[in-house]
Image: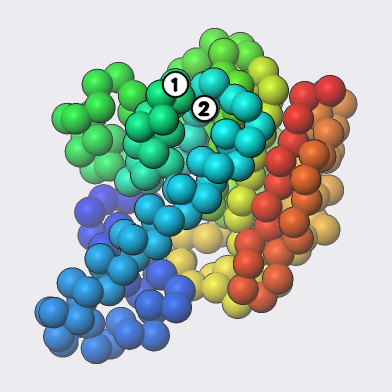
């Protein structure tokens, strides 16, 4: 999948805005309004996620699958040492023009950071994009780089929007995701918080190092 500009402005993959997609292709002002609404939504999510991280008392954060970088930008504004990685050259090139060395092109299963370098590794709506046979290595990288916390959020098969985006290739139940994560991280990590997915809210997890 090529995560280029066309991907990120594709309204058809954003629930519930996908229902407007046929109209937005015909009415340019409506398309512009929906894209601005999506951007505002991402900024709100970044603010909420920052609050979780600040409550944990972390001083450094790596956001894996950072996309447009809203979380990292929000954290930097509060003087938290934050970095973002993504496989999208489009996003990283755009962000790097303003934020020197804060955003890097990298895959989730090969993070360019030393062991236990970062207080918290976050993966918001990332793992559903990862092939099932690469999830183990990806979780292993989170555990290698983080010295304290891992935060994960993703849609499960319980969510009505789980397959709105065709790049969601690993859509499993709450229980299967919990089994996978416990199997891969259970020896040295424990669940600090579990919020199971519902039809309208994603699975949200905080793990801390034992």
Q: How many marks?
A: 2
Q: Measuring from the top left, give residue 4's x and y in whole percent.
A: 26, 51
Residue 204, how many percent across, how many down? Answer: 68, 52
Q: Position of residue 55 (x, y in %)?
A: 63, 36
In percent of width and height, residue 14 lies at 41, 70
Quarter holding residue 188: top right
Task: Classify the position of the C terminus by image quarter.
Answer: top right
Secondary structure of the residue carrying tag 2 is strand
For residue 61, which numbered disc appears in the image? Answer: 2
Identify the residue at horizontal 56%, vertical 59% (top origin): 169
Question: On residue 112, which mark appears?
Answer: none
Query: What residue do we see at 16% from left, 87% from top?
Result: 26
Q: Which sits in the foreground, 210 or 50?
A: 50
Q: Residue at x 58, y 69 (%)?
A: 162
Distance from the alpha carbon under mark 2 to that under mark 1: 6 Å
Q: Residues within 10 Å of mark 2 (few under 14, many from 20)?
A: many
Q: Considering only vertical position in the picture, is 185 above or below 176?
A: above
Chain-order first, disc 2 or disc 1: 2
Image point (76%, 30%), residue name: 208
Kindly indicate whether the residue at mark 1 contacts the one at mark 2 (C-beta within 8 angstroms). Answer: yes
Which residue is label 1 attached to? 81
Would you say 55 lies left or right of 193 here?
Answer: left
SS type, badge 1: strand
Q: Is residue 157 above or below residue 186?
A: below
Left-right relation of 93 to 181: left
* Residue 74 is at least partly visible in this image: yes
Q: Is residue 4 left or right of residue 66?
A: left
């Amino acid at each position: 999948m090529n995560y280029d500009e066309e991907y990120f402005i594709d309204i058809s993959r954003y629930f519930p805005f996908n229902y407007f997609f046929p109209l937005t292709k015909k009415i340019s002002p409506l398309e512009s309004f929906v894209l601005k609404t999506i951007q505002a939504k991402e900024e709100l999510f970044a603010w909420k996620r920052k609050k979780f991280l600040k409550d944990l008392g972390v001083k450094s954060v790596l956001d894996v699958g950072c996309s447009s970088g809203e979380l990292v930008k929000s954290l930097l504004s509060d003087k938290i040492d934050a970095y973002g990685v993504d496989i999208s050259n489009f996003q990283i090139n755009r962000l790097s023009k303003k934020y020197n060395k804060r955003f890097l092109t990298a895959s989730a299963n090969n993070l360019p950071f030393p062991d236990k370098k970062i207080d918290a590794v976050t993966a918001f709506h990332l793992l559903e994009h990862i092939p099932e046979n690469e999830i183990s290595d990806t979780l292993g990288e989170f555990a290698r780089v983080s010295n304290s916390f891992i935060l994960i959020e993703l849609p499960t098969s319980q969510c009505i929007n789980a397959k709105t985006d065709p790049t969601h290739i690993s859509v499993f139940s709450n229980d299967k995701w919990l089994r996978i994560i416990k199997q891969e991280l259970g020896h040295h990590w424990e669940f600090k918080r579990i919020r199971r997915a519902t039809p309208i809210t994603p699975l949200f997890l905080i793990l801390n190092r034992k």
